Image (tube, rainbow, N blue to C red):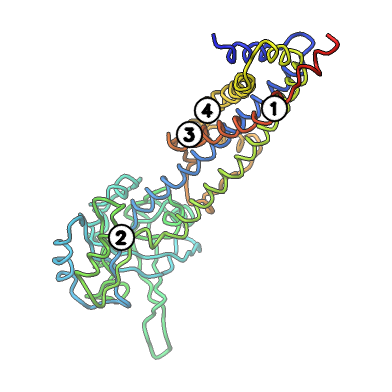
Amino acid sequence: MPLTLLMGLRHLRARRHQAFISFITTVSIAGIAIGVMAMIVVLAVMTGFEEDLKEKILGFNAHVLVQTPGPSTVDPAAALSKLAQVKGVTFAAPFVLSQVMVRGGGENVSGVVLKGMDPKDLKRLPSLQKALAGGGVEGLEPVGGPPGVLLGKELAGQLGVLPGDEVELISPFGTPTPMGMVPKVRKFRVAGVFGLGLYEVDAAVVLAGLKTAQGFLDMQGEMTGIELRISDIYRARTIARQVQETLGFPYLVRDWMDMNQGILRALRVEKTAMFVILMLIVLVAAFDIVTTLVMVVMEKRKDIAILKVMGARDGQILGVFIFQGFVIGLAGILLGVAAGILLAMNVEVVVRFFERVFSLELFPKEIYSLDRFPSKLEVGDMLRVCAMTALACLAATLYPALMALKVEPTEILRYE
């Protein structure tokens, strides 16, 4: 075994009178492990939040949105025929959108967004079909009674209604009468309840058939825009540009990245900030490595002097302490990675446990727009954490190693 490795391993095995050095070494390993674990878990949670939010946003909202400055009376058939020629567009459906009020069986009233789409188009949205807990899109068409609507589960809970119950929609654009403007009120039957897991949608969206919504909003023959879905969501910007060139004026085309750039940018900035902040934990643990190795150098001054007298080169002396610090760092990294992966895979269980024990809601869905605590491990994030930690540990060995080089054999062995 090379001298560097042999001496480094011997120094890691503390003797009886060196128990304090052994304790500091253990603390250093634990500090690095905690830092690595914290970074892996936080990055996994942040990645999970981003992916889950992105999936739910794109599962319900358009990948590319085509709108006009106001309600358009242009026949959408011409626009749809042009959109069918754009490569990458897999779905195109006209819709109407407006703010209304909804009232349940009691006095519960809530402001919502009424979205009208053709039931045939709604059937082509897999996320909506999967999210329907009661009823279905088929119930939107009126059959001998009030037309149907689909409510988000949070909204249905606020109103206290179930599938089959009736609700009233109140339009802010009333009907003019000799007595003034009278709000337009119409009864609808709850055809189903959907739960997309996105609180802003589940608590504030009512879905209706396109013709039903147009009739209620007095928008016969008009549309708010056209919703597009594409085969590759990361080509949305390129496809949006092609759609804009194809349709021209007066259409305005936006992609999902433009429409959600605020929240996506905030998530990326927060992820980077958390990585930098948690890296400080590792740097603190690296200072413990400096302390440990400085104490080892002070303890082993005679051994270092003897090695130098016996002909040990400076590179070998440096290697002994660099290897020792690297082993401490590697042990902490391996323990931290194992603990981080285990915790990241069970983070929702841990969060729910703390919520039950302390009777707290740590992550309110009204704020975070999610109904669960997501976590997604990425190999790239873990490799970046390990690489940064390894560099910090190696940097921490330089000062003690240089101290060892400054040991003068003649001064140490003069009276031996």
Q: Disc 2 marks which residue?
A: 237
Residue type at numbered disc 3: Met
Circle 4 packing at 10 Å, graded few (<14), some (14-19), many (20+), is: many
Mark 3 touching mark 2, by CB under 8 A? no
Residue type at numbered disc 2: Arg
Foreground disc of the pair 1, 4: 1
Circle 1 packing at 10 Å, graded few (<14), some (14-19), many (20+), is: many
Q: Disc 1 marks which residue?
A: 400
Q: Position of residue 404 (x, y in %)?
A: 71, 23
Q: Position of residue 57 (x, y in %)?
A: 38, 53
- Of the image marks 3 and 2, the number of the one nearer the N terminus: 2
Q: CA distance from mark 3 to mark 2?
A: 30 Å
Q: CA distance from mark 3 to mark 4?
A: 8 Å
Q: Is residue 144 in view from this perspective?
A: no
Mark 3 touching mark 4, by CB under 8 A? yes
Q: Disc 3 marks which residue?
A: 382
- Give the image quarter of residue 92: bottom left
SS category of the residue bearing label 3 = helix
- Of the image marks 1 and 4, the number of the one nearer the N terminus: 4
Q: Disc 4 marks which residue?
A: 337
Residue nearer the viewer, 236 or 282: 282
Q: CA distance from mark 1 to mark 4?
A: 27 Å
Residue 63 horizontal side relative to residue 160, left or right? left
Residue type at numbered disc 4: Val
SS category of the residue bearing label 2 = helix
Residue type at numbered disc 1: Pro
